[in-house]
Amino acid sequence: MIYHRKKGLFETFFENRSSLILQYENGDISKKEFLQYNYDFVTSMNVKPFLRVDSYEKGMYNYQYYNVLAKYFRMLAKDIKNSKKHQKYYITYLNKGNNYYHEKDKSALAVLKIIEFKNVEAYFISVESKGLKDKLYEVVLKDYKEAIFHSKAEWLLDILKKEGVFFDKKRVSIINEYINETY
């Protein structure tokens, strides 16, 4: 794909992301399609995550890159589990997804360090999923457009608390409909 090289990696990446978010919010695509289109776009860009994260843009790219892959492989694992076919791949895809989630959380921390935890709010969110209840929290970077992280990593939660940006009161997610839609 040559288009993103002419326009600029970050501009192309964030424009596509915003476009997919808008399509999802308007009901033009389902959550599953949103995840698939994100995966297709990220892999077509053929740009790996940055080894050195020294800017907000690089950190957000890495976060989204790992988030897209994590959700994609978890979706594949779930599809296999539900189909009862090729069960040997279930654990492989699940492990890949979990590894990408861990990398995503490390990327979120890199971004938070770059912005020095300024104008950040974090809190547990209300969810319909029993498996995520009292585990999933949201981190909002209030000075940036569409900059919302989600995690259930306890080590990251400890850092958020230490930095004084985590609030104990549970809230409704800013993207509640997306969070609670199954795929």
Image (tube, rainbow, N blue to C red):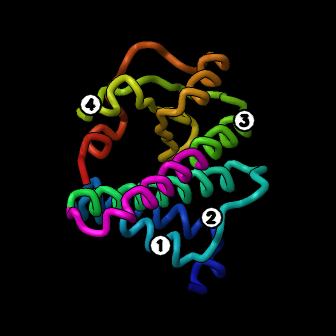
Q: Is residue 137 left or right of residue 157?
A: left
Q: Is residue 21 left or right of residue 138?
A: left
Q: Does residue 21 appear in this view? A: no
Instruction: State which region is magenta.
Output: 83-103
Tag in front: 3 or 2: 3
Q: Position of residue 93 (x, y in %)?
A: 43, 60
Upstream in sequence: badge 4 or badge 2 = 2
Q: Closest to the observer: 129 or 125?
A: 129
Q: Which residue is mark 1?
A: 41
Q: CA distance from mark 4 to mark 2?
A: 36 Å
* Magenta segment includes 135: no
SS type, badge 3: helix
The three-letter code of the residue at mark 2 reads Phe
Upstream in sequence: badge 3 or badge 4 = 3
Whether label 3 touches label 4, CB < 8 Å = no
Label drawn at residue 113: 3
